[in-house]
Image (cartoon, rainbow, N blue to C red):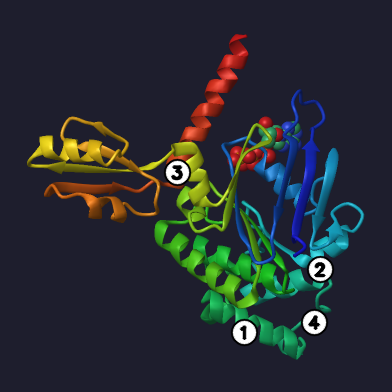
Amino acid sequence: MEPIIRVEQLRKQYKNSKRPAVDGISFEVGRGEFFAFLGPNGAGKTTTISILTTTLSKSEGTVMIAGYDVEKEAAKVRRNVGIIFQNPSLDLDLTAEENIRLHVSIYGVYAYRPFYSMMPKEYKQRIEELAAIVGIHDNLFKKVKGFSGGMKRKLEIMRSLMHKPQILFLDEPTQGLDASARQSLWAYLQKIRKEENITIFLTTHYLEEAEEADRVCMITHGKVAVLGTPEEIKHKLLGDKSMLIDAGDRKALRAELEELQVSFTEEEQCFRVRFQDKTPQSLVARLQTPLSRMEVHQQTLEEAYLSLVQQSQNDESRKGAV
Ligand SMILES: Nc1ncnc2c1ncn2[C@@H]1O[C@H](COP(=O)(O)OP(=O)(O)OP(=O)(O)O)[C@@H](O)[C@H]1O
């Protein structure tokens, strides 16, 4: 199947800057995929997402969005994408619905009418449908001035979905939201994704939000460092998974681990055993010595990310030392 996003050898060098912000990155995203694009501050995420959404010109490379070239067919690209950027751009003196009405008329989706009642039936249906999913139904006709940060973000997402985009670009959508607002935002983003088969392209500094992604791309210094499923990335950057076990009869347990030829290290109060399967079930089933402790260490994307950032900092300081 043709990928819905195709980026080939993308490069961006800002005027007056010594090194490129994006330095020859390539990747593809499939239709309906949840793709997380991660990296430390200044890695080039916003630059990339701005080029993909036609708000910034590239220096070199090819970018195709929904089959259209970002530069030659920018208007068609815009018609197929929804964008949520870091800084909300709502008019606080208008109601939620008025903000949406203004937006869709600027984007040429529906002609502007001075009253909601005069808008076409399809517009009203779409608003009703999205407001129900997002949960701001009761506040649709209230001024945005009184909205909380979470409600404003929901309204922005709703607004970006009015024209039924195929791809939703989210640049740190939950920044500044508290944990419960973040959770509820994700719950309905997943719902929208399922109901509308939307492709999600996300940048975030909250790594746990990317755990659910189909694939993750981590960039450092404008280059792709790793790309794969969260499991693949964790394995690549952190190695085999491990669990901690112990037994009253440590001697017997040690002998058994040696006999089974399992990779393990002995720590102060336990053995750290490495395993490659999804869970340590099959290994545990083979042990006869009664265990007094068993703790599976769950690897996280955050650990993988921190290890990548550390590696990249070490590489930079080595380069600086040469
Ligand atoms: N308008 C600009 N002119 C010159 N340099 C810029 C401009 N915008 C960004 N940069 C530089 O390009 C690099 C990449 O920036 P970018 O904003 O894309 O990173 P980012 O990964 O989105 O960072 P953050 O996580 O902090 O948002 C940085 O070194 C930044 O200083």
* Residue at the disc numbered 4: 113
At horizontal 51% and vertical 76% (from top left) the residue drawn is 135
- Three-letter amino acid code at the position of disc 3: Glu
Q: State left or right for residue 106 relative to residue 144.
A: right
Q: Is residue 148 visible?
A: no
Closest to the observer, 126 or 250: 250
* Residue at the disc numbered 1: 128
Q: Secondary structure at mark 4?
A: loop
Q: Is residue 273 above or below residue 113?
A: above
Cα separation between marks 4 and 2: 12 Å
Which residue occupies the extreme right position in the image? 72
Q: State left or right for residue 98 relative to residue 186.
A: right
Disc 2 vs disc 3: Cβ atoms closer than 8 Å?
no
Q: Is residue 60 above or below residue 144?
A: above
- Image-quadrant location for residue 13: top right
Mark 3 neighbour density, 10 Å: few (under 14) some (14–19) many (20 or more): some
Residue 159, percent across and down? 67, 70
* Residue at the disc numbered 2: 106
- Image-quadrant location for residue 315: top right
Q: Which mark is residue 302?
A: 3
Report the mark closest to the observer, 4 or 2.
2
- Three-letter amino acid code at the position of disc 4: Arg
Q: Is residue 158 visible?
A: yes
